[in-house]
Amino acid sequence: MSVTTHPTAVPAPAPIAFWRLKGFPLIPVLILLLIALVAIFADVLAPYDPEIGSLARRFRPPAWQEGGSMAHLLGTDHVGRDVLSRLMYGARVSMIVGLAAVLFAGVLGTFLGIVSGYLGGWVDQVIMRLTDTWLALPGLTFAIFLAAIVGPSELNIIFILGGVYWTRYARVIRSEVLSLKEREFVNLAIVAGCSRRAIMWHHILPNVINSAVVLATLMLGIVIVTEAALSFLGVGVPPPRPAWGLMLADGKKGLMVGYWWLTVLPGLCIMLMVLSANLLGDWLRVKLDPQLRQL
Amino acid sequence: MTAEPLLSLENLSTHYVSQQGSRVVRAVDDVTLSLNAGESLGIVGESGSGKTTLALTILRLLPPAARIVSGRLVFDGEDLRTKSDSEMRRVRGKRIAMVLQDPMASLNPLFSIGDQVGEPIRVHEGASRASAWQRAVGLLKSVRIASPEMRVRQYPHEMSGGMRQRIVGAIGISCGPRLLIADEPTTSLDLTIQAQYLDLLRDLQRRHALTLIFITHNLGIVARMCNRLAVMYAGRVVEQGPVARIFNAPAHPYTQALLGSLPRMSDERERLTAIEGQPPDLASLPPGCAFAARCPMAFARCAAEAPPEFTLGEGRTARCWLAAPATARAPLSAHAVGGEGGAHAEGIGG
């Protein structure tokens, strides 16, 4: 038999779900890496300019379908732009907007969460009531409202999404800080003469970074979907730019007459990226749990 | 050396006040203690007797509901009650250090030992990270941790319980404090580790000329570690004085009962002696002596009038009518007191 089988080395049977989470999510990570690489090297990889098409070559189907050609592997859209090139540049938009918005939301939410949880009192009341108010508004509607005010641009979308989703960080981080600040090591720091600022940023922050990272991977999916939705609704990334949500919006009219590649392909990209980010987040959540890690 | 005590508390009271102000819990009530440099004071009492609140009062680290309502708190010639919060921060960890109840949980799991031992040095002396690490190595050596150069780079989860304990001790002495308050530092340890740790603390006390306040409910530890003892009951110090003299002849019935409840090797009793009843509610103390309801020697005056602190020779006081000098006893039923007081003066430990 093969040398790789170790029948005696198998430990007591563990729940299947645990094994799934414990194991490194190789495929999701590879997908994310692939999307990231494509986003970084879109200039080199994309065969055509994503914003300029030729009306003579509109609605070409993908290469493997009848009427398709190798010149446009994934076909062309209603103004003759190459779908593959647009998907590649779209990955760049999704990655940049997604990561930057998550980072912005994370920094803002973590800061407010720590301050709120550690200082307590009226500071806590103000921040938490603000959070409650924020959460009472539906995220997408709120984002559309903000986008309508400040106008669509990639930079604005980043701040809008960050400004809408920081509340989740604030809530999660605050609750974590509430339990952390009762821990004995925080008392020891107080007894040792550390100031409140030093305790918050030196002792509490490193202990909540794990949660913030896990939350970030889970938020990445939500943010990307929301970005796509905003673009789809016309208040996100402005039209000539290649964004997946925008491609969906442009392609939806063609869906009924058989131009499936204009919607299915960007939809597939969004789904793969969100799914991968969530699977990675699930795994990280277990992996970075301080209790489990110390075992 | 001047005759001035290092720490002196005069009629210090700390009360917890409920939000409406309707309930007042007298956690520390009218405590007068003084401690000379180099002495070690044991504070004993059952749970809820105000030991920890007393320690937190000295460090001015009380929870928001608690307030120091009266008295003086003088440390090293300075009145700590008048200091601002930032001035107190410079006292904590630098001049008064504290070892907490559960040193096992006192270390931050995310920082290396070197960073944690060096932290007070960086906070108080503005030392660089590198020089704080150097000092940390020396401190680990002084708490007898083997191969300290390797250990400073490790993390708390890589240490055994006894080692973490000693590391917390090293943090305590890192800035060379004059006073070290240890709040039940051995409750979470098994007996052999406990013994090693007490040895270490005593050794550190000798070498660094530390003044030690040892809060515990274990009289055995007091006998081993301390030269002075203060017994707390219901927020008050009911008896204090040199350890040996209190152990030989306890003046307060509560102290007698505490010592009586200790099992001895020679004991032939089947059951341990317990003190009947419960300590009183600190929010509604009886008008007389707080221990009267449980005291086997209580008499009429005990329930009516709280005893003041009577001085019984040098540095020794007791809050009990039985300890009152003859002149103070006179007002109420002199004959009833006479008999019991006389029997008591012989002591039960002799």
Image (cartoon, rainbow, N blue to C red):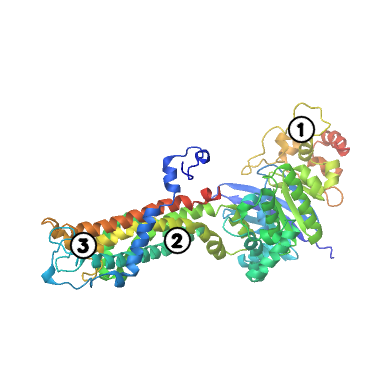
Q: Give the labeled residue for mark 3.
A: A74
Query: What amino acid does circle 3 point to?
Result: Leu
Q: Chain of mark 2?
A: A
Q: Residue A292, image x and y in percent?
A: 51, 48
Residue lying at the far front in this picture: please name it: A1
Q: Secondary structure at mark 2?
A: helix
- B328 left or right of B44 in image: right
Query: What amino acid does circle 2 point to?
Result: Thr
Q: Residue B102, image x and y in percent?
A: 64, 49
Whether labels 2 and 3 share one chain: yes
Q: Give the labeled residue for mark 2.
A: A110
Which of the 4 image quadrants contains residue A161?
Answer: bottom left
First in sequence, mark 2 or 3: give its number: 3
Q: Residues within 10 Å of mark 3 (few under 14, many from 20)?
A: many
Query: What amino acid does circle 1 point to?
Result: Pro
Q: Which mark is on residue B296? A: 1
